[in-house]
Image (cartoon, rainbow, N blue to C red):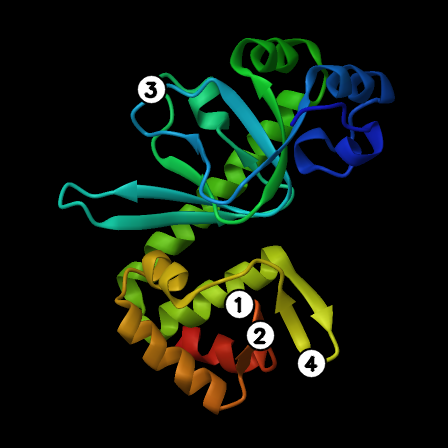
């Protein structure tokens, strides 16, 4: 499915924030709107990327396989995030597989057109650099957490990180809009699902978090999670 996307929608996306109406109008003509099913592959680690995607609704998993065949989740990305940009501007192409986790709506643009827009639309390249800096900072923080925290601390930190980016205030606390399974969390914190399950049972028993039927985590005591991260 593909059709036009409104300039109002584009203006709310970080990649296009602050751009002129003329620039947004041009981008609206160039971008394609797509809705894809869960389990669709948007990019492959084995092929040079030919499109950049910006998520409007839904979420994707960025994953990598080790030499032993173990799946590692590098990131879960939801609305507002950009996917595939490294494969367009980098010399070596995409470094991981990108798979949709649920029905996902995105806008996309091909490699050649996106590179032309970076050169001709004022502010677009600066927005992309800002997004890449945030992505790099997040990766560095995750590496640090893996090296110094135990499994409980890593799970607490990951829940807080997801809440910071995808949390919304509700009566009971902070609800993470992305659906999350214990396997998702385990792959992000380099632990077994069983270890993560043990941690989540404890967090729920202590009233720190709860999990809805649709796999949405709500944080009731963020300060308790912060204490677990601090050790």
Residue 5: percent from the left, percent from the top? 77, 27
What residue did someone put label 4 on? 172
Residues under numbered marks 2 and 1 in contact, where contact means CB atoms less than 8 Å apart = yes
- Look at discs 1 and 4 and give the one toward the viewer: 1
Q: Quadrant of the C terminus?
A: bottom left
Left or right of 48, for residue 67: left
Left or right of residue 174: residue 192: left
Is 214 above or below relative to 17? below
- Report the mark closest to the observer, 3 or 2: 2
> Residue placed farthest to the left in the image?
68
Residue 150 visible in rendering: no
Label drawn at residue 92: 3
Nearer the camera: disc 3 or disc 1: 1
Give the mark nearer the N terminus: 3 vs 1.
3
Closest to the camera, between mark 3 and mark 4, is 4
**Residue 79 location, x and y as percent?**
63, 45
Residue 211, position in %: x, y? 54, 76
Which mark lies nearer to you, 2 or 4? 2
Q: Which mark is residue 212?
A: 2
Q: CA distance from mark 3 to mark 2?
A: 41 Å
Number of labelled discs? 4
The residue carrying mark 1 is 215
Q: Residues within 10 Å of mark 4 (few under 14, many from 20)?
A: few
Task: Give SS at disc 2.
Answer: loop
């Amino acid at each position: 499915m593909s059709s036009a996307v409104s300039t109002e929608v584009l203006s709310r996306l970080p990649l296009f924030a602050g751009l002129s109406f003329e620039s947004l109008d041009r981008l609206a003509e160039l971008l394609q709107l797509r809705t894809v099913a869960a389990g669709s592959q948007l990019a492959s680690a084995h092929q040079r990327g030919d499109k950049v995607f910006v998520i409007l609704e839904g979420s994707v998993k960025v994953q990598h396989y080790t030499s032993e065949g173990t799946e590692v989740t590098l990131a879960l990305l939801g609305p507002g995030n950009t996917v595939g940009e490294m494969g367009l501007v980098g010399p070596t192409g995409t470094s991981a597989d990108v798979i949709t986790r649920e029905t996902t709506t995105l806008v996309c643009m091909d490699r050649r057109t996106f590179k032309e827009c970076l050169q001709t639309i004022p502010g677009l390249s600066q927005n992309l650099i800002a997004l890449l800096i945030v992505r790099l900072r997040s990766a560095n923080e995750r590496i640090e957490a893996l090296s110094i925290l135990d499994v409980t601390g890593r799970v607490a930190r990951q829940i807080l990180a997801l809440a910071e980016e995808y949390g919304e205030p509700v009566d009971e606390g902070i609800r993470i809009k992305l659906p999350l399974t214990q396997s998702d969390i385990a792959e992000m914190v380099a632990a077994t699902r069983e270890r993560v399950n043990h941690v989540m049972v404890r967090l729920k028993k202590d009233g720190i978090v709860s999990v809805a039927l649709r796999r949405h985590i709500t944080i009731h005591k963020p300060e308790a999670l912060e204490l677990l991260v601090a050790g």
